[in-house]
Image (cartoon, helix red, strand yellow):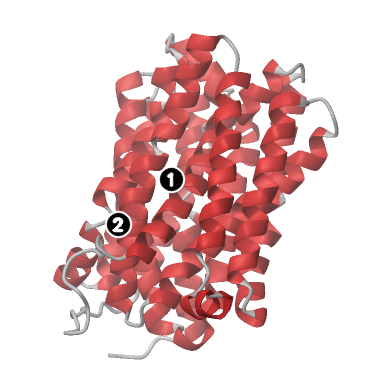
Amino acid sequence: MKPVSKAMLMLALVLAAINLRPGITSLAPLIERIATELALSRGLISLTTALPVLCMGLLAPLAPRLAVRLGLERTIALCLALITLALLLRLGSQASVLLIGSAVLLGAGIAVAGPLLSGFIKRHFRDHVGQVVGWYSFSMAIGGAGGAVLTVPLTQGLGDNWSHGLAAWALPALLALLFWLRLPNRAEHAAQSDAQGLPWREPRAWLVTGFFAIQAGFFYTMATWLVARYHEAGFSLLHSNGLFSLFMLVGLPSAWLMPWLAQRFDIRQPLLVACGACMSVCLGMITFLPQFLPETWAVLMGLALSGSFSLSLVLPLYEVHTPLAVSRWTAMMLCAGYGMACLAPILVGLGRDLAGSYQVPFMVLIGLALLMTVLAWALRSPSEQRVKA
């Protein structure tokens, strides 16, 4: 088997990562329009975000088993094929059944790819984990920001047909699929030291999972309802979309920088605490004083949320030491984390329907941000805890 260069492996990782978010974030700028045209309630339209997140939780435990059965590279290629198919189905998403069905397929592809890409990093970039995870999360942020910023121009350029604008994201997914099919497949074998199944009885695995669940819930809630919250607060639709785009774009440097800083200066836990505290302040301002310096809070929230996501991806890589063990910890983090996170956009949508305002559900989000800060503080390494004691 001809060896593959590190540059090719890195390019494969970047192409896969770019396609893990546009299928979700591309809906945010259009969600109120889609809900109106399809006559869907906010609780129901939020399923387009919540169902992928739920699938990402329920199906993540399958990732290590599929890697053992099919091989790591072929399983990731299969995930990219599902993502491509899901996005192509959105050509017919004027039918709400197809729109919601595409969300399920999309979540299935992302669910299995996420843990395996972490294992892929552990296998091929063991000595450069922080730097490579930085590029991985940066690539995901590029995809997420692209979905948020470019979907409206794509829709306008395609005859103002929002189903075509959503389906256009199948093209980069197809490109990534074709690239991964060229990689040699290598079977993944379970090491004897790897625990069988997911680490449900590990307390630190639950700390990692809890932190991940809250920050993921925030991201998908913002990806669904932030534009609507700004619009309700008195901003024009153009200004609301601009603030949302700013929120997504400023996360790009943070997604790369945070893991690098965490590894370079060994400050993962202080950075996690800082992200949680920043989210608490930003959500408080968006909830109670949305008209006061809105660009400032959009920027800070984008930095904190993107940073907390990239840092949470690093955590399993430092807890265990083999690719399959990393995949299992990551699978648990994604399984339980996304399983809880999927409720956030649904509950915010239902809260808006019941209360008649986004302010009430956003007040609940402030409490979750404070809990996120507490969990970050608890994620001190065992050595740090012994020093404090």
Q: Report the disc number at residue 362.
A: none
Given the image, on which type of amino acid does mark 1 rest? Ala
Q: Residue at x 81, y 41 (%)?
A: 296
Question: Residue 376 appears at what percent x and percent y?
Answer: 55, 58
Q: Residue at x 29, y 79 (%)?
A: 184
Q: Please indicate, yes or no, whether residue 64 appears anywhere in the rendered image.
A: yes
- Which quadrant holds the N terminus? bottom left
Left or right of 73: which side holds 195?
left
Quadrant position of residue 268: bottom right
Q: Is residue 19 above or below residue 158?
A: below
In this view, the residue in front, 134 or 142, is 134
Q: CA distance from mark 2 to mark 1?
A: 18 Å
Q: Give the residue drawn at x 47%, y 39%.
A: 24
Q: Earlier in the sequence, mark 2 or mark 1?
A: 2
Give the residue number, with chain letter if any, for mark 1. 170
Q: Is residue 262 left or right of residue 168?
A: right
Q: Which mark is residue 112?
A: 2
In the image, is residue 168 above or below residue 128?
above
Label 2 Cα crowd, 10 Å radius (few <14 / some 14-19 / many 20+)? many
Q: Are marks 2 and 1 in contact (CB under 8 Å)?
A: no
The amino acid at mark 2 is Val
Whole-percent x, y for residue 288 in the image: 73, 25
281 or 93, which lies in front?
281
Looking at the image, which residue sits at the far bottom? Answer: 2
